[in-house]
Image (tube, grey):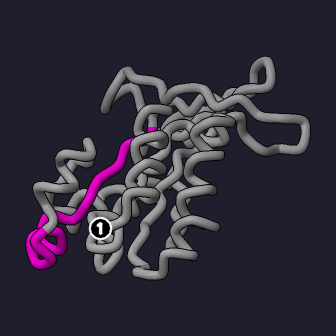
């Protein structure tokens, strides 16, 4: 039986600390790739800025104006996250399609760089899919894309 050294045991998941970064090296027999570096702050947190996903489903106009859309607008304007996506889903699609002030907020949010998507099934059920598309909203099936986003460790999710 081959004698195993400590180095041979640690090599498959070797962590190398260099200039405040962590590099994760994989077993060279499987792959020669090295994971991207993650910078660490003095307190141990990372410099990786997460992305933001906001799910707006409420038909309450005050919730939309005073919290949901205002927060999304500020997050995009101030670059608090590495990308912001707003999903309009459920009764909020009908509210948005029939409220010019909310539409103006959505247009501003899109102009500032946020992705805005709406659930195709819900929009169709309320008969507003075309109106939402006219606003520049990406109307599409949401279930599977949302599931993929939720499985992403670097995404923060807020619901309204």
**Which of 37 and 61 lies nearest the eye of the viewer?**
61
Please tell me whether mark 1 sits on a helix, a strand or a loop.
loop
Residue occupied by mark 1: 98
Q: In which quarter of the image is the N terminus?
A: top left
Residue 148 visible at all: yes
Residue 3 visible at all: no
- Residue that appears at 57% across and 76% down: 62
**In the displayed structure image, the side of residue 159 where residue 29 appears, left or right:** left
Check the image and name the residue furthest to the right.
42
- Residue that appears at 21% across and 68% down: 143
**In the displayed structure image, the side of residue 21 where residue 89 appears, left or right:** left
**Which of 113 and 98 lies nearest the eye of the viewer?**
98
- Residue that appears at 54% across and 40% down: 13
Check the image and name the residue furthest to the front.
100
**In the displayed structure image, the side of residue 29 where residue 122 appears, left or right:** left
Pointer 1: residues within 10 angstroms few (<14), some, or many (20+)? Answer: few
Q: In which quarter of the image is residue 97?
A: bottom left
Residue range highlighted in magenta: 114-127
- In reply to whether residue 119 is colored magenta, the answer given is yes
Q: Is residue 11 above or below residue 56?
A: above
Residue 12: x and y in percent read 49, 38
Q: In this view, does 23 lie above or below 99?
A: above
Q: In this view, does 123 lie above or below 152?
A: below
- In reply to whether residue 52 is colored magenta, the answer given is no
Residue 57: x and y in percent read 39, 75
Residue 65: x and y in percent read 56, 65
- Residue that appears at 82% across and 44% down: 44
**In the displayed structure image, the side of residue 20 where residue 137 appears, left or right:** left
């Amino acid at each position: 039986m081959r004698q195993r050294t400590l180095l041979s045991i640690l090599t498959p998941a070797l962590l190398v600390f260099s200039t405040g970064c962590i590099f994760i090296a994989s077993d060279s027999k499987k792959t020669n790739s090295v994971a991207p570096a993650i910078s660490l702050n003095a307190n141990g947190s990372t410099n990786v800025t997460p992305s933001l996903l906001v799910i707006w489903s409420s038909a309450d106009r005050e919730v939309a104006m005073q919290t949901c859309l205002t927060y999304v607008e500020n997050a995009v304007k101030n670059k608090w996250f590495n990308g912001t996506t707003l999903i309009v889903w459920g009764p909020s699609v009908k509210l948005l399609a029939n409220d010019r002030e909310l539409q103006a907020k959505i247009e501003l949010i899109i102009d500032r760089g946020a992705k805005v998507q709406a659930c195709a099934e819900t929009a169709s059920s309320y008969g507003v899919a075309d109106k939402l598309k006219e606003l520049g909203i990406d109307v599409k099936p949401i279930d599977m894309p949302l599931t993929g986003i939720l499985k992403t460790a670097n995404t923060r999710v807020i619901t309204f």
